[in-house]
Image: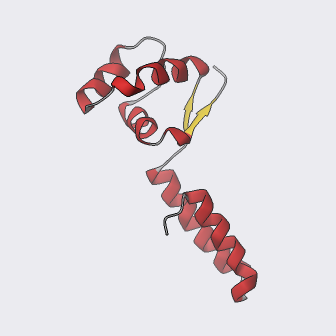
Amino acid sequence: MTYTFDEAIEKIESITDELNIRQEVINDVVSVVEGLREEYAPTIEMTKLQHDVFADDMEDIATQEHLDLFITDVPGLGDMTVRKGLNAWLHPETIKIVDE
């Protein structure tokens, strides 16, 4: 079975009582999962403008070259980087809208 990071953390926390595992062990395992999430699916913070521009053009971004041009040429993207853009493109569920 495949889990999202949040689902994995919920599953880990739910087995604490079932298997009589010490809370410190569960905390360590959850910490590892959270570290993996931060590395491989970090939350991408975007302003509403960044998200609107990104969402409008997301389907047209088909190659790394297009993504590079999108990030460097579209006005209003602020601190958006190619890596953040690529992560958001691959995993739009990681996008969090923040104030400008």
Q: Say whether residue 21 is visible.
A: no
Which quarter of the image is occupied by the C terminus? top right
Q: Say whether residue 94 is visible.
A: yes
What colouring method underlies this structural image? secondary structure
Q: Nearer the viewer, residue 94 or 71?
A: 94
Residue 16 horizontal side relative to residue 91, left or right: right
Q: Nearer the viewer, residue 68 or 89?
A: 89
Q: Residue furthest right?
A: 17
- Residue under the point 32% across and 27% down: 67
Q: Is residue 31 above or below residue 64?
A: below
Q: Position of residue 36 (x, y in %)?
A: 49, 59
Residue 13 horizontal side relative to residue 40, left or right: right
Q: Position of residue 80 (x, y in %)?
A: 45, 26
Q: Nearer the viewer, residue 41 or 7?
A: 7
Q: Is residue 25 above or below residue 94?
A: below
Q: Position of residue 76 (x, y in %)?
A: 48, 13
Quadrant of residue 85 in the image?
A: top left
Q: Position of residue 26 (x, y in %)?
A: 66, 76
- Residue under the point 52% across and 55% down: 37
How many numbered discs, if any?
0
Quadrant of residue 82 in the image?
A: top left
- Residue under the point 38% across and 27% down: 59
